[in-house]
């Protein structure tokens, strides 16, 4: 029996009990225990409480000294694009000079530039890249992450991407409808191909399917066709929506029972109300909005209306080159109007719900022992220390996965 005792922590902060994603007042309900311990046995949390309540322990025990540290649940990144080749640093330079994301995409840059670089990798090379990106996430306290395909747009590279995400420990999402492949004769022709030639095998590797519903990519009719086929193959549904325009993503997500609709930078009052009345989680990606100099998503309006929200990095080479959920929490507090407690819940239990996980996202008895220890006496440094190197130790499934 493997036992890990994390003792003398300054604070343990965790979302409170409850079912499903938190919303409304409960979104800000964080329980804090001072001068605390967490006991992990065989990969699960056995006990948590103040040091004064630490029970007698027998046998071989690994101990972590938590003095000066605070503990939060292992962070959950529910929207990343880690399976790619090359980079887009030249595009970054052009954008800094005034070129828009849509202009770059229309001229052959953007997603299709990364498609070319990703197709040039063999499966081993792609797996190395994804594993490296997973290490970056772990260094920022992320213990669970979703990884999308979508930079292959052909059979072999899409399937290789999903296998690479699985091998690196991520939750694979088939973003088969990320863009139209350059060799295809339009969006409908491309969908004919992926649904007939890729879907069956992708559904054996992925947990969910995603589509980029946006002007110039896939419209609502095409997105419906793709998502309905994926649902029929047993995949959960996700959507990229309202990033640049409102093109019907929220109504479609609600109608089809999608787990989430992600981005929402262009969402107006009607979309906010519709999402608040639904069970679909709005995944907000403030690092992407910052990177592209786009308006921030209406986080405060969504929360105040009663919508369920999560936060994620949108890690990708073109529009959000960061793997840091602490940075995202800082942006949530300074740019989106969220409290530190709301941000914490949005990157833990709410993000876990988007992935269909009920065993992570809290520090509570019976939950998987995934914890992030911050090198700070107060857990709110998670968002407070902007860009700071605040992760001290990461515990994953009851074992120390990273220690600084």
Image: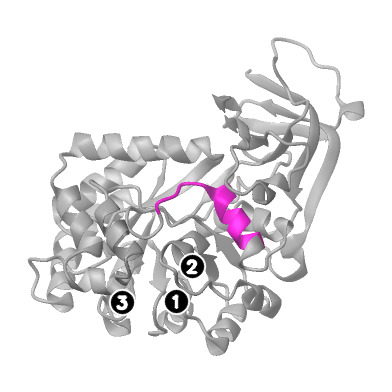
Tag 2 and tag 3, C-beta contact below 8 Å: no
Q: Residue at x 70, y 14 (%)?
A: 61
Quarter of the rendering containing residue 233: bottom left
Residue 326 colored in magenta in the image: yes
Q: Position of residue 376 (x, y in %)?
A: 73, 36
Q: Give the distance between the C-alpha atoms of the residues marked 3 and 1, in whole angstroms.
A: 10 Å
The disc, 3 or 1, on the residue closer to the chain's N-terminal end is: 3
Where the C terminus falls, by quadrant?
top right
Please give the label number shown on residue 253: 1
> Viewed as shown, does residue 37 lie left or right of 140?
right
Q: Give the distance between the C-alpha atoms of the residues marked 2 and 3, in whole angstroms.
A: 14 Å
Magenta residues: mostly which secondary structure? helix
The disc, 1 or 2, on the residue closer to the chain's N-terminal end is: 1
Q: For the residue carrying disc 2, how many other residues have a C-alpha within 10 Å: few (<14), some (14-19), or many (20+)?
A: many
Please give the label number shown on residue 223: 3
Q: Which residue is mark 2?
A: 260
Tag 1 and tag 2, C-beta contact below 8 Å: yes
Residue closest to the far bottom: 270
Q: Which residues are magenta?
A: 321-333
């Amino acid at each position: 029996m493997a036992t890990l005792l994390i003792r003398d922590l300054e604070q343990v902060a965790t979302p409170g009990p409850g079912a499903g994603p938190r919303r409304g007042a409960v979104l800000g309900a964080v329980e804090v225990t001072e001068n605390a311990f967490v006991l992990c046995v065989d990969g699960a949390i056995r006990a948590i409480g103040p040091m004064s309540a630490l029970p007698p322990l027998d046998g071989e025990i690994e101990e972590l000294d938590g003095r000066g540290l605070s503990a939060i649940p292992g962070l959950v990144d529910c929207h990343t694009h880690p399976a790619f080749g090359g980079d887009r640093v030249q595009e970054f330079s052009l954008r800094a000079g005034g070129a828009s994301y849509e202009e770059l995409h229309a001229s052959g840059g953007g997603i299709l530039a990364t498609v070319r670089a990703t197709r040039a990798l063999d499966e081993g090379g792609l797996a190395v890249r994804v594993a490296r990106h997973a290490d970056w996430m772990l260094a920022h306290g992320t213990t669970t992450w979703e990884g999308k395909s979508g930079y292959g747009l052909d059979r072999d590279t899409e399937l290789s991407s999903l296998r690479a995400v699985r091998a690196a420990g991520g939750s694979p999402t088939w973003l088969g409808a990320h863009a139209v492949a350059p060799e295809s004769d339009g969006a409908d022709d491309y969908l004919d191909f992926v649904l007939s030639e890729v879907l069956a095998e992708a559904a054996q590797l992925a947990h969910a399917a995603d589509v980029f519903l946006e002007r110039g990519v896939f419209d609502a009719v095409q997105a419906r066709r793709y998502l309905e086929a994926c649902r029929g193959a047993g995949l959960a549904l996700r959507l990229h929506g309202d990033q640049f325009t409102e093109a019907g993503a929220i109504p479609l997500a609600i109608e089809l029972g999608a787990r989430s609709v992600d981005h929402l930078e262009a969402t107006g009052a009607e979309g906010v109300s519709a999402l608040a009345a639904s069970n679909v989680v709005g995944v907000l990606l403030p690092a992407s909005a910052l990177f592209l100099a786009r308006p921030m998503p209406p986080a405060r309006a969504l929360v105040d209306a009663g919508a369920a929200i999560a936060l994620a990095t949108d890690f990708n080479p073109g529009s959000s080159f960061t793997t840091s959920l602490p940075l995202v929490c800082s942006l949530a507090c300074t740019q989106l109007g969220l409290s530190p407690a709301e941000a914490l819940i949005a990157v833990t239990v709410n993000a876990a719900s988007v992935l269909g996980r009920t065993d992570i996202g809290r520090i509570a008895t019976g939950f998987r022992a995934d914890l992030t220890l911050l090198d700070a006496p107060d857990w709110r440094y998670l968002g407070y220390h902007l860009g700071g190197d605040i992760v001290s130790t990461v515990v994953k499934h009851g074992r120390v996965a990273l220690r600084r």
